[in-house]
Amino acid sequence: MQSKIDETIALLKQAEDEYGPDLVFASSFGAEDVLLIDLISKHARSIQIVTLDTGRLPQQTYDVMDACRDKYGIKIEVYFPDTAEVEAMVRESGLNLFYHSVENRKRCCEIRKIHPLKRALAGKKAWITGVRREQADSRQTMSMVEDDTYFGLTKFNPLIEWTQAEVWNYIRDNDVPYNALHDQHYPSIGCACCTRAITVGEDPRSGRWWWEQEDGVAECGLHASPIKRK
Ligand code: SF4
């Protein structure tokens, strides 16, 4: 466990040294992300932390954002969707459009997440994420450092080899603030309307966009098809 922590710290420091102000950590304040915030605040403090407020987040996510801000004394840049884009989408398709078709759901994720993330990453050369390999089949081929062809950046995934148990051991051992929804059986937390609790034995990703059956476990497009570098 300590060797994994040391390896993660070393990668964060390497990313910080290599990319400086051209590097951001995009956090959604899930369990993995608060772990990384704890490590960044202690070992690589100049790394900028950004997050997306889609406008549909649960209160518990705002609570953990402020808890981290207060505990670690860090700055968190919050990016919001473009007002005109959201207004046009809602005018055309309603507030709950994502339940009506996959196309609508992708459009909503595009406007509320992808476009703000593109603004957050604009002019940057590298970004850090909290993805882990065991979270989804689509993450099996991801590696610790890769070329993200979608965003045109180097992507660091320092927790790619961490297990869920290791993440929670770290959080408990280090008294890291975490989203209270995790204690109510929410393994993966996104927008309130698109996230639910799961039962024992269910795939953790089935807590997101559960009404979409045809493509198996759904992804929002934030971590699409990167190319392995090492
Ligand atoms: S998770 Fe749901 S509400 Fe959030 S951006 Fe995607 S479709 Fe829209």
Image (tube, rainbow, N blue to C red):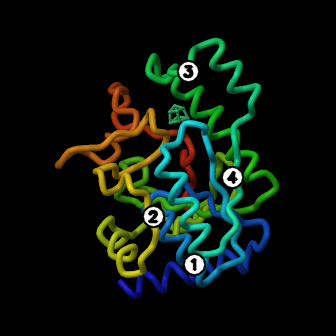
x, y (%) of residue 224?
Answer: 55, 45
Choose mark 3 or mark 1, whichever is in front: 3
Q: Which comes sooner in the sequence, label 2 or label 1? A: 1
Which residue is drawn at the image coordinates 52% and 42% (left, top)?
A: 57
Q: Which mark is residue 95?
A: 3
Q: Residues within 10 Å of mark 3 (few under 14, many from 20)?
A: few
User: Residue 29 versus residue 215: which sits nearer the camera?
Assistant: 29
Which residue is the site of mark 2?
32
State which tag comes first along the sequence, 1 or 4.
Answer: 1
Amino acid of disc 4? Val
Q: What label does residue 138 carry, if any?
A: none
Q: Residues within 10 Å of mark 4 (few under 14, many from 20)?
A: some
Q: Label 2: few (<14), some or many (≥20) within 10 Å?
A: many
- Mark before the other along the chain sequence, 2 or 4: 2
- Mark 3 and mark 2 lie on one chain; the one further toward the N terminus is 2
For image coordinates 65% across by 50% down, the residue present is 149
